[in-house]
Image (spheres, rainbow, N blue to C red):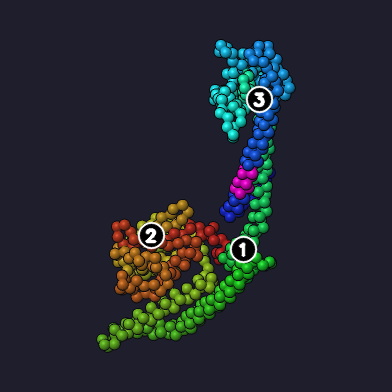
Amino acid sequence: MIRALFAGRRWTSLRLRLLVVFALVALTAAVSASGIAYWLNREAVLTRVQEAALGDFRQEMQNRAAALPGDPTPEEMQRTAELMAGSSPGYSVLLVDERKDGRKVFGAAGPDSFGLDDVPKSLQHAVNDRQKTTTANDAEYHVYWQRTKPQGNPYLVGGTRIVGGGPTGYMYKSLAQERDDLNALGWSLTIATGLALLGSALLAQAAARTVLRPVQRLGDAARRLGEGELDHRLDVSGTDELADLSRTFNRTAEALEKKVADMSAREESSRRFVADMSHELRTPLTALTAVAEVLEEEVDDLDPMIAPAVALVVSETRRLNDLVENLMEVTRFDAGTARLVLDDVDVADQVTACIDARAWLDAVELDAERGIMARLDPRRLDVILANLIGNALKHGGSPVRVSVTVEEEWLVIAVKDNGPGIPEEVLPHVFDRFYKASASRPKSDGSGLGLSIAMENAHIHGGDITAANAAEGGALFTLRLPVDVGKVIAGEVDA
């Protein structure tokens, strides 16, 4: 039944603690109640049996043993013992009379074999110890008793002596029946304790369902809220603390939904502004670029005083054009409109083409075997490589080493420069937008978007880029892409 109770359920720590607390309380209460009940019943049973047996024995000693003549014969002692044991069945009787010459005469009868050796020495001394009579003690001898367990069987042994002279009597009663009754009571109390424990588990389950169900609903609602379902609300009923908590959750969710909506609207407005601005800048930049190219061709014929200014205009125009292109690329990533155009390419040829197109052949060492094929977007791979290698050449210095390997269905391209490396405080920020470590890289004249765009292009492939410092010196950028991007992001690819 307990297995069926716990089967198929997910037990949270709170539920488990509630069950354990209920079980411990029930167990403590049941064990305490059972122990007290057992102890009280045991004392009551033993006291009742003891008083009945000792009272009857005392009465028999007064009626029969006291009637024996002085120096009774063994036959008289035996007959008296039989009469005492027979008048009240259930205990054995031993009568002992000591002659003046030191000889002892015995009389024994009853259901148990009973001799003087079965009487504890301490009880014999107490029975034969003559007391002084006072106003508080009017008898020289009293009835004494003791419980013993010869061979593990419980017995009640009692004894007394006739006042004024006469035999000493002992009674020997078995408590086996009372022991069996008490054992049966103990088993009954044990079963009751077990039933109480099981009942506490059922009550704990009911209480847990009542108390924890609203908490579970609140947890599910919080999870759905964290997953983006900002319009989710809880049904609230009642006036208890959990109902107040649910109302607070609904108010919080409503405020969060409004704040997120406002932030999304502002973000969309900012993104649209950047996209519109970049688009609007392209037309005048096209004209400026054309003029800059014409000026660049005529720079040798210009006045030496004007030539540096013309060179600066040409350089800044190209930089501004790159910045606009990068901003437009960033807005496409932010808007989620960037798409892959997959093709099967030879990675070594692709890296060589990227280096050759930018005239970097003399400054780059390529370690790549031909025949390493990958399915990816060649244009975006070219953007990633151009940013990583260009960044290495600009900030680290040549020669730049590019190695291409395949590790368990992953294409790994490592770009290592020959510079001083990247400061530890800069490493966490190298892929942040518009981040420039000008203190460590004073020659930086980029927009601060190149590595960020490279990372976005890696992510859209299902890959990643890491930056670190090589053990032998220099910065090391590692690009990891799936060999077959189509299998990784099949649902998001425009082939």
Disc 2 packing (10 Å; few <14; some 14–19; many ≥20): many
Q: Point out the stretch of residues depicted in magenta.
A: 23-34
Point out the residue furthest to the left here: 304
Question: Looking at the image, is mark 3 or mark 2 earlier in the sequence?
Answer: 3
For the C terminus, the quadrant is: bottom right
Examine the rendered structure and indicate whether residue 280 appears above or below residue 462. below
Q: Nearer the viewer, residue 420 or 194?
A: 194
Residue marked by disc 2: 414
Q: Amino acid at mark 2?
A: Ala
Point out the residue furthest to the front here: 135
Q: Position of residue 137 (x, y in %)?
A: 59, 32
Residue shown at 67% from the left, 45% from the top: 196
Label at residue 282: none
* Left or right of 441 on screen, residue 137: right
Q: Nearer the viewer, residue 435 or 363?
A: 435
Q: Amino acid at mark 3?
A: Lys
Q: Is residue 281 magenta?
A: no
Residue shown at 43% from the left, 54% from the top: 406
Residue marked by disc 1: 218
Q: CA distance from mark 3 to mark 2?
A: 98 Å
* Element carrying mark 2: strand
Residue marked by disc 3: 173
